[in-house]
Every structure is written in C-alpha cells, then in structure tokens.
Image (cartoon, helix red, strand yellow):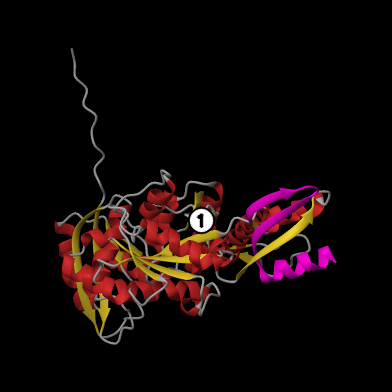
Amino acid sequence: MTEFQIKTPVKEKAGVIFPNFTKSEIRLSPQARLEEACGLALAIDLNVVYREIINLKEIKPASFLGGGVIDRLSPLIKEKEISLLIIDAGLSPIQQRNLEKKLNVKVIDRTALILEIFGERAQTKEGSLQVELAHLSYQRSRLVRSWTHLERQRGGAGFLGGPGETQIELDRRIIDDKITKIKKELEKVKKTRSLQRKSRQKIPYPVIAFVGYTNAGKSSLFNMLTQANVFTKDLLFATLDPTMRRVKLPSGREVILSDTVGFISDLPHELIMSFRATLEEVLEADIIVHIRDIANPDTQEQKKDVLDVLAHLGLKEIKQQNNYIELLNKADLLDLQTKQRINNHLLSRDNKLLTSAVTGEGKEAFLEMLDKKLATGFLEKKITVSAARGDILAWLHNNARILSKEPIEDKIILSLQISESKWNQLENKLL
C-alpha cells in the first residue's frame, strides 16, 4: 500500500531591515522596532532568515539606501535565497522600484506589510471592505509615471476631445471608482452601526471600549471577562474585527464590552482612516479602557503611540477625563519586587490597575472600578409614580437604572440611578 505524505508548504524567506536615522523621532528603540517588524512578518507566516539595523545619515531620493549598503546586501540576499525584503519605513514608489531592480528581489515597506496582515486577518464583510479601501488608497499613491504602460494614451471619443487619456489617468480613475463604491458600502455599514447604537441606548447598556497596542493582551482580557472565545495568539494583529459581549458588574448593572483593533507605532494613515467606522465604537463609548503590556520595556512609548491614534480620532485629552481607565496587563510576567513597586504607585490612582489575563489578577477590582466610574455623574433618586402611568414607567426602564420597586396600593415607589440630564427630562414629564 502506497503511503502519501502531506507536504508542509515552504515558507517564503524574508529579510527585514530597520533603517535607523541619527535624527529620527521614532519613540521605540531601534532593536524594539526591528523585533516588531520581524513580528509583523511572522504574523503572515514569513520565514525571517535575515534581520539588521542599518544606521543611515540620510535618505537617498532615488533608492532610499546608499550604494554601499545596496552592494553589501545584494550577495547576502542571493546567498540566503531571500525572495522578499521588508524595509521598516515608508518608501516612495520610485525608491521601491529602484531597490527591486538593484537587489533583484521583491521589496515592500512598513505600510504594505501591515496592509498584507490586515488583508489576511479581516473576517467580516466590514473588515474586508475597510482593508480593501486602505489597499486602494495605498495603490493610488503608487501610480507614478515610472512604468512604460502608464505613459500610453487612449484616444478621446464622443464629447471627450483632446489628445486622450493616459494609462495612468485611466488606472487612477478605475481605483477612484472602486474607492467611491467601497465608501458607499461602508456608509451603509456605518448607518447599521448607528441604528445598533440607538437600539442599545434605548436599553441603556453603557459601552466599555478596549483599546491598546497590538499584542498587549486585549482579546485575552476580553475572553477572561466575558467567557467569549475571541481568537488570541502571540501575534501582532491577531484580531481585527470588533467583538461585543454583555457583562454583569458587581452592582448588577449590565454593560457591553467592545474589543477593537490593536494600534501600532507609525500606523499607516490609510488604515486609520479606513478603520474609522470600526473605531467609532471607541468615540461613542461611555468608558475607554487602555490595555497596556506592563512587562514590555517599551510600554511607555507604546502608550504614547496609542494616545496619538486616539488624538487622531478626536480624543486629544482622554487621559484627563473621568471615563479613561488604564489596565497594566501581563502582571504574571513581572517579578514580585516590580509588582510591589507598581502596586504601591497605584494606591493613589483611581483609574489604573494591575491585571493579568492569565491568572485573573485584578478582574474583580476592574469590574468594581467600572461600577464606580459609571456611578459618577448619576443621581440617586426615589420617586412615587401612579401605577396607571405606563408611559412614565416605560420611559424609566429605558432611561434610568431601577434599583428597587415597591408597589403600594395604586402607586409604585421606585429607587433609581439616573443622569442629571435625564432627571431634568423626567421632571418635565411629571409636571
């Protein structure tokens, strides 16, 4: 009997370069950025056989890297059989094309790499549309007069006189048409999300949005708190599509937890804009929970990168607001002395907490913190309503939290928790 063996597909060999500029404003250390870029490559199952930090004084306009560096890399790429070279920076279309010609290998930059990951990870129709939009926006910027087929002209016809339309103009118009179509489809998704939010507001479940640097443990914490089964793995951008689950707090109040896409340093502009529909969940959230990997040596720099993206979305002063919480996750990776020092520092803080998605540390304290935050700005009131006023009772169930009900004859005494604005509305109704 013949035995058939299933061959494991051979992974594409890749090289990763982080160009370190002497006057760079990159927050992460060069080594951390190189490791992050290699992590991105591993996230799409590439076999990284070569990695290097290359110190550069300046960018060469034509090829990004200098001639000496290219001459040194060329035999190395051939020797290691590298078929894809990743430059962890932004390349212009001409720089990319010239590097490919001189090194005889496919070259991509940081934006293209992240777009590739997003393309693999998006599961829902909305996620796929957002990734396609980002891809098209990126491709549009690659259309330059560098390739011969883009210099051809098409003759004018009908009312379109003149010398005709060059191929680059045609390609750009095709991409623009696709972008317009996808934006219309995403607008429908946005309207659906808006309707979903309105229906949630009628049943007043506060929304708690998780944000954080990619691989900070957002999805793991989300799973621990909600008993959900969101995909988690030690990969950058393991999950892309937002997930929402209902959770009951110690007080009995029910809230909705929302897990969103992870952020990263130098997140491409195309992606921020494309995922704006998804990230609107963050803008509309009652409380924003920033999950940080406290065991990562670059945790402070990662925090700044996340706050930068939030600021880009319109949440500039979020740190100073009452609806912002920081969870210092991965406490299980810290030694006892470091944990003690952090806990001592957090004693005076009412919006920071040490947690671990692995051990469950901080879970109860976090849920209590949510309860406390949500109670801030709410009034505790006791009112008596006629049992015949079904309209008022229905309104209260939709706009306030009923703590207790006590029927007495033809009346009902209610203890409630209600926002000040809703209380004013109720008083007008009772006049």
In the figure, is residue 22 to the left or right of 210?
A: left
Task: Evaluate whether residue 71 shows in this view.
Answer: yes
As helix, strand or loop, the secondary structure at mark 1 comes to loop
Q: Amino acid at mark 1?
A: Ser
Quarter residue 300 falls in: bottom left
* Residue drawn 55% across the image and 70% down it: 376
* Number of numbered markers: 1
In the figure, is residue 47 to the left or right of 366?
A: left
Of 402 and 11, nearer the camera is 402
On the image, the x and y values in percent for residue 240 come to 45, 54
Q: Which span of residues is magenta-colored?
A: 402-431
Quarter residue 182 falls in: bottom right
On the image, the x and y values in percent for residue 231 come to 38, 46
State whether residue 275 is above or below residue 56.
above
Q: Quadrant of the C terminus?
A: bottom right
On the image, the x and y values in percent for residue 179 come to 60, 59
Task: Evaluate whether residue 196 shows in this view.
Answer: no
On the image, the x and y values in percent for residue 159 come to 78, 63
Determine crowd level at label 1: few under 14, some 14-19, many 20+ residues with C-alpha closer than 10 A: few
The residue at which mark 1 appears reads as 251
Of 370 and 195, nearer the camera is 370
In the figure, is residue 372 to the left or right of 77?
A: right
Of 97 and 227, nearer the camera is 227
Q: Given the current orientation, which residue lies at the most extreme top position?
A: 1
* Residue drawn 15% across the image and 64% down it: 75
Of 426 and 52, nearer the camera is 426
Asked if the magenta segment contains residue 291, the reply would be: no
Quarter residue 76 falls in: bottom left
* Residue drawn 35% across the image and 49% down it: 232
Q: Quadrant of the N terminus?
A: top left
State whether residue 329 is above or below residue 45.
below
